[in-house]
């Protein structure tokens, strides 16, 4: 007799649904604060792991990883076969697995293979391009996996360079989106208006409007 297991997963809001519908193999999501990028990333990880596939989550530091690790453990608890707190690894009854990593030591990922990787707060990862090109990208080769880079912009750094791939018609495997905080329907417009009125223009443009700003330039 088979047993059904029901998971309680948050429903994506319309902007998150659009991103998922328009996705390509390599995806960059530049968004304002409180847009819901981390929840989108968690949804993407759960989606692929439930299919019985290995996936990985990357954060800039272990401290920034802690909340996501707790969320994923809670979301996947009904279908989790084994938990390793030391390795930040979940093994599911579907055959899928979730590895959570800190990119302050990217080389530890070498030798793994994944069907999907999610890099959260990508703009805060030092040496992001090196980590992507030399460590993370090879992990997708065996399973023809996909990749997601999620972040609020932070200057014209490695995340900006990856974002530009999605705007380049000669790179059809890449897609990019730039979405302000107001694309999250659960954030009140009056709160955003108050922030616009009280914050420096550059700060509001970057943190709430997801603008890529060079140092020393205007908005």
Image (cartoon, rainbow, N blue to C red):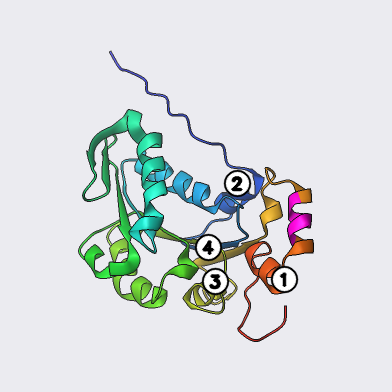
Return the x and y of residue 208 as percentages of the image width and height. 67, 61
The residue lying at 39 percent from left, 45 percent from top is 48
The residue lying at 27 percent from left, 60 percent from top is 142
Q: Nearer the viewer, mark 2 or mark 4?
A: 4
Q: Nearer the viewer, mark 1 or mark 3?
A: 1
Q: Nearer the viewer, mark 1 or mark 2?
A: 1
Q: Earlier in the sequence, mark 1 or mark 2?
A: 2
Q: Secondary structure at mark 3?
A: helix
Q: Is residue 11 highlighted in magenta?
A: no
Q: Report the residue marked by disc 2.
A: 17
Q: Report the residue marked by disc 1.
A: 200
Magenta region, residue range: 191-195
- The image quadrant that residue 116 belongs to is bottom left
Q: Earlier in the sequence, mark 2 or mark 3?
A: 2
Q: Report the residue marked by disc 4.
A: 151
72 relative to 100, above or below: above
Foreground pick, 2 / 129: 129
- How far apart, in angstroms, are the residues tagged by discs 1 and 3? 25 Å
Q: Residues within 10 Å of mark 1 (few under 14, many from 20)?
A: few
Q: Secondary structure at mark 2?
A: helix
Q: Earlier in the sequence, mark 1 or mark 3?
A: 3
- The image quadrant that residue 175 belongs to is bottom right
Do tag 1 and tag 4 residues touch (Cβ < 8 Å)? Answer: no
Q: Is residue 192 highlighted in magenta?
A: yes
- How far apart, in angstroms, are the residues tagged by discs 3 and 4? 10 Å
Q: Secondary structure at mark 1?
A: loop
Q: Report the residue marked by disc 3.
A: 163
Q: Earlier in the sequence, mark 1 or mark 4?
A: 4
Q: Secondary structure at mark 4?
A: strand
């Amino acid at each position: 007799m088979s047993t059904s297991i029901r998971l309680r997963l948050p429903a994506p809001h319309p902007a998150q649904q659009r991103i998922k519908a328009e996705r390509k193999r390599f995806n960059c999501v530049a968004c304002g604060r409180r847009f819901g990028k981390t929840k989108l990333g968690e949804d993407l990880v759960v989606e692929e792991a439930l299919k019985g596939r290995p996936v990985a989550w990357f954060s800039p530091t272990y401290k920034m990883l802690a909340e996501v690790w707790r969320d994923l453990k809670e979301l996947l608890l009904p279908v989790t076969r084994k938990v390793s707190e030391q390795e930040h690894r979940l093994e599911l009854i579907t055959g899928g697995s979730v590895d959570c990593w800190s990119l302050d030591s990217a080389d530890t990922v070498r030798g793994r293979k994944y069907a999907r990787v999610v890099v959260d707060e990508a703009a805060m990862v030092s040496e992001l391009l090196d980590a992507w090109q030399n460590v993370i990208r090879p992990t997708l080769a065996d399973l023809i996996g996909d990749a997601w880079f999620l972040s609020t912009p932070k200057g014209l750094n490695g995340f900006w360079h990856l974002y530009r791939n999605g705007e380049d018609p000669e790179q059809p495997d890449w897609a990019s989106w730039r979405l302000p905080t107001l694309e999250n329907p659960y954030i009140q417009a009056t709160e955003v208006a108050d922030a616009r009125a009280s914050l420096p223009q550059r700060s509001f443009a970057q943190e709430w409007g997801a603008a890529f700003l060079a140092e020393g330039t205007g908005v």
